[in-house]
Image: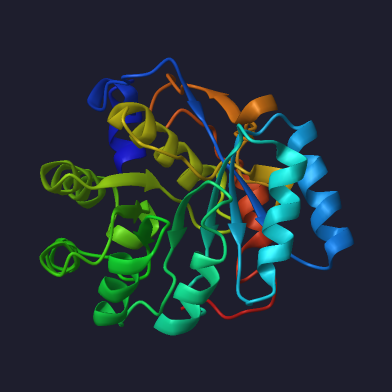
């Protein structure tokens, strides 16, 4: 809707959300496999010049992989973890205490999203700052997390938090509470959501980390004629054209529509 309204007046979303930075720098994401796979993926990230990297973890044994990634990317790379709620409180603390010397920025969602007490307990004892994702959808969630002293950081996502306006409100609340935040993404998101995220990231200016704009690094085909995939070092330019700043290809949408793939229209 925002894209249509802005295009009708030949305005860019950048006019509504003025950028506070000249470009946006994105993070890489690394999923662990075998040690050989982890090494290969980490070297690919290094060769791409990415200096902010999120590592997906789910096992006690992942500590060896994390140390390998640190060795490959070097001491100056910014590394953070994402457990997606894989651990209980005791296991999370065991894993995090064993990584205290690796210089990690944060651990995202170390326990399940509905375990507020577990989050608070981990945060109280963890040597690594705790970020929440699945635990945080609404302003009400934010208030509960703040009151419980359950986190150090928020992961905000447009697709999770209800769009642009609610996400900006959550960023404001984070600042008021002295909580840092990153702007996350939806796995496999199209250029439409990536474009909206880039505008929001550029406008906020003080986002610690930005995820998204993976484009055809993850997708077989994206829906815009312009590539939104970030470049070397994760750097991506601002979007200034009308609307979201992209041109959606109707032909691509048609090829991937539900009807075209044999599913009934609802």
Q: Is residue 249 left or right of residue 126?
A: right
Residue 72: give x, y in percent of width and height.
77, 42
Which residue is nearer to you in this view: 139 or 52?
A: 52
Q: Residue 110 at what x, y percent from top left?
A: 44, 71
Location of residue 105 in the rendering, given as x and y in whole percent from the top left corner: 46, 47
- Eyeballing the image, is 5 above or below 216? above
The colouring scheme, among rainbow, by chain, secondary structure or one colour, is rainbow
Drawn side of residue 19 relative to residue 250, left or right = left
Seen as rendered, the residue at the extreme top is: 22
Which corner quadrant of the image does residue 124 belong to?
bottom left
Q: How many marks?
A: 0
Which residue is at the front of the view, 119 or 133? 119
Q: Camera-side residue: 72 or 167?
A: 72
255 or 233: nearer the viewer: 233
Q: Residue furthest right?
A: 36
**Can you say whether 22 is above or below 60 in the image?**
above
Left or right placement of residue 10 versus residue 226 in this view: left
Residue at the image point whose x is 61% and y is 41% from the top: 249
Q: Quadrant of residue 75?
A: top right
Residue at image location 62% in from the left, 71% down from the top: 259
Residue 133 percent across, percent down from the top left: 37, 63
Residue 88 seen anywhere in this rendered image of the structure:
no
Which residue is at 84% across, 63% downward? 35
User: Which residue shows up at 79% across the image and 57% down it?
Assistant: 38
Residue 206 visible in the shown view: yes
């Amino acid at each position: 809707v925002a894209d249509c309204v802005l295009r009708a007046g030949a305005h860019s979303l950048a006019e509504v959300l003025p950028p506070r930075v000249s470009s946006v720098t994105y993070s890489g994401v690394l999923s662990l496999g075998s040690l050989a796979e982890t090494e290969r993926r980490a070297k690919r990230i290094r060769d791409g010049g990415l200096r902010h990297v999120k590592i997906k973890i789910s096992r006690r044994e992942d500590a060896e992989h994390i140390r390998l990634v640190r060795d490959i990317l070097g001491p100056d790379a910014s590394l953070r973890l994402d457990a997606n709620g894989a651990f209980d409180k005791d296991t999370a603390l065991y894993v995090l205490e064993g990584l205290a010397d690796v210089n990690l920025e944060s651990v995202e969602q170390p326990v399940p999203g509905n375990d507020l007490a577990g989050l608070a307990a981990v945060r109280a004892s963890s040597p690594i700052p705790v970020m929440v994702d699945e635990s945080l959808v609404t302003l009400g969630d934010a208030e509960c997390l703040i009151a419980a002293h359950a986190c150090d950081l928020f992961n905000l996502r447009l697709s999770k938090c209800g769009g642009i306006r609610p996400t900006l409100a959550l960023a404001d609340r984070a600042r008021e509470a002295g909580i840092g935040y990153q702007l996350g993404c939806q796995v496999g998101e199209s250029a439409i959501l990536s474009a909206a995220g880039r505008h929001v990231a550029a406008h906020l200016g003080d986002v610690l980390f930005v995820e998204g704009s993976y484009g055809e690094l993850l997708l077989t085909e994206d829906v815009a004629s312009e590539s939104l995939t970030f470049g070397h070092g994760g750097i991506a330019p601002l979007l200034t054209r009308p609307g979201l700043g992209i041109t959606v290809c109707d032909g691509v949408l048609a090829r991937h529509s539900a009807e075209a793939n044999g599913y009934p229209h609802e």
